[in-house]
Amino acid sequence: MTRRSLIIVISGPGGVGKSTVVRELINAYPDLWLSRSWTTRKQRPGEADDAYEFVSVEQFEDRIRNDGFLEYTTFLDNHYGTPHPRPSDDKDVILEIEVHGARQIVAKNSDALLIFLEAPSLEEQKNRLNVRGDSPEKIAERITKSKEEATAGRELGAHLLINKDIASTVEKIRSIIEETRIILSEKEPKP
């Protein structure tokens, strides 16, 4: 008997290390499947080609018209969206999305697991944004927006984790996933 896939939402402001944490989770645990989001923003220098599906505004809007997204939003003048996931059997789905998208996921799936990451400090978050090549203006926008995102994450009841060390953050998330699987399996009707 196959189990139902768990939807795991990893969210948090820019510069907290979401992509790095998600990459490590996917590499370490073959029972997880990453849904690659679409975006209309330009690819950053040095950013992996498969970090997003980089598309035009027209392509994105066409996908909306055809009900092609599980969730989508506009964030800092760019569109972001998650196509309807299609993992292979017995894999849980990881969505690396903004808080607004997380809110849409919870509205559609109350069993979704929400994990909200924060940087150890505002200074560290600024450093991480700078290292990845964001302009000073974008960094300022993201820092301002991060305060709203943290409040929203708390309101959604997400598990809050400070991403100080990648390895320990990945282990904490793995532990939360395992606990959630146990809770959900106890809720499932017995044959």
Image (tube, grey):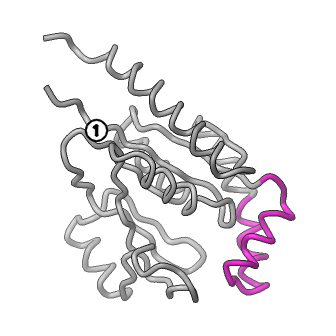
The reply, left or right, for residue 138 in relation to residue 54 is: right
Q: Residue furthest top?
A: 190
Could you tell me residue 42's position as x and y percent? 50, 88
Residue for point 39% across, 27% down: 181
The reply, left or right, for residue 168 in relation to residue 188 is: right
In the depicted view, which residue is nearer to us: 81 or 4? 4
Provide the major secondary structure of the magenta segment. helix
Location of the N terminus (image quadrant): top left
Q: Name the residue under label 1.
A: 5
Q: The disc labelled 1 sits on which kind of residue?
A: Ser
> Residue 57, relative to residue 166: is it above or below?
below
Q: Residue 72: say if magenta.
A: no
Residue for point 71% across, 50% down: 165
In the depicted view, which residue is nearer to us: 155 or 23? 23
> Residue 115, relative to residue 119: is it above or below?
above
Q: Where are the magenta residues, as a range? A: 120-146
SS for tag 1? loop
Could you tell me residue 163's position as x and y percent? 70, 50
Q: Residue 124: say if magenta.
A: yes
